[in-house]
Image (spheres, rainbow, N blue to C red):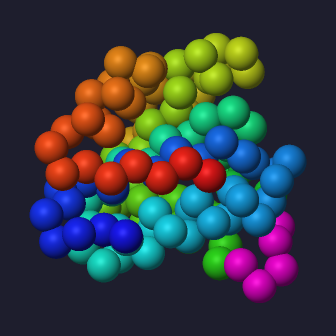
């Protein structure tokens, strides 16, 4: 649980359409935190990296879940969204391919964020 001293919530989504409930949980928790005023850094890794591309979130379907494009838009508007460097490279995704506002960065940036004083990290 986030404490009042937490300065940053880092959420790493490791699943995409291959594990839709886990994927949706990551997006839902991150966007709920962002909507509540928590500073959020959201990482797209593994199969969730595909959601960095235009139109891919709209293809995601999960009954009784908030639409992924809405959650992604909220995260882009209020937090930082990052696609993993290696995950993007394995899928031939380049910085020119991703949605505006999504950066591609690697493990060193992730470690820097999760070791920031007061940071909390969640992996889905």
Spot the residue most to the bottom: 64
What is the magenta range? 61-65
Q: Which x, y percent locates residue 15?
A: 72, 46
Q: Which x, y percent locates residue 30?
A: 46, 63
96 to the left or right of 33: right
- Quarter of the figure with residue 7: bottom left
Residue under the image location 31 percent in, 61 percent down: 78
- Quarter of the figure with residue 4: bottom left
Q: Which x, y percent locates residue 31?
A: 45, 68
Q: Is residue 53 visible?
A: no
Count all numbered tags in the image, as a single digit: 0
3 to the left or right of 90: left
Residue under the image location 20 percent in, 39 percent down: 116
- Which residue is more in the foreground, 94 or 12? 12
* Image position of 28 with respect to 117: above or below: below
80 to the left or right of 18: left
- Which residue is more in the foreground, 5 or 61? 5
Residue under the image location 65 percent in, 42 percent down: 14
Quadrant holding the N terminus: bottom left
Examine the structure image and report whether residue 63 is included in the region drawn in magenta: yes
């Amino acid at each position: 649980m986030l404490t009042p001293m937490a300065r940053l919530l880092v959420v790493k989504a490791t699943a995409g359409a291959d594990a839709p409930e886990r994927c949706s949980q990551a997006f839902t928790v991150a966007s709920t935190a962002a909507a509540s005023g928590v500073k959020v850094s959201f990482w797209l890794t593994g199969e969730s990296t595909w959601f960095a591309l235009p139109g891919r979130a709209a293809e995601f379907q999960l009954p009784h879940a908030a639409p992924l494009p809405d959650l992604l838009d909220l995260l882009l508007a209020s937090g930082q969204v990052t696609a993993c460097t290696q995950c993007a490279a394995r899928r031939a995704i380049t910085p020119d391919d991703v949605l505006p506002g999504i950066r591609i960065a690697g493990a060193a940036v992730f470690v820097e964020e999760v070791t920031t004083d007061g940071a909390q990290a969640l992996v889905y």
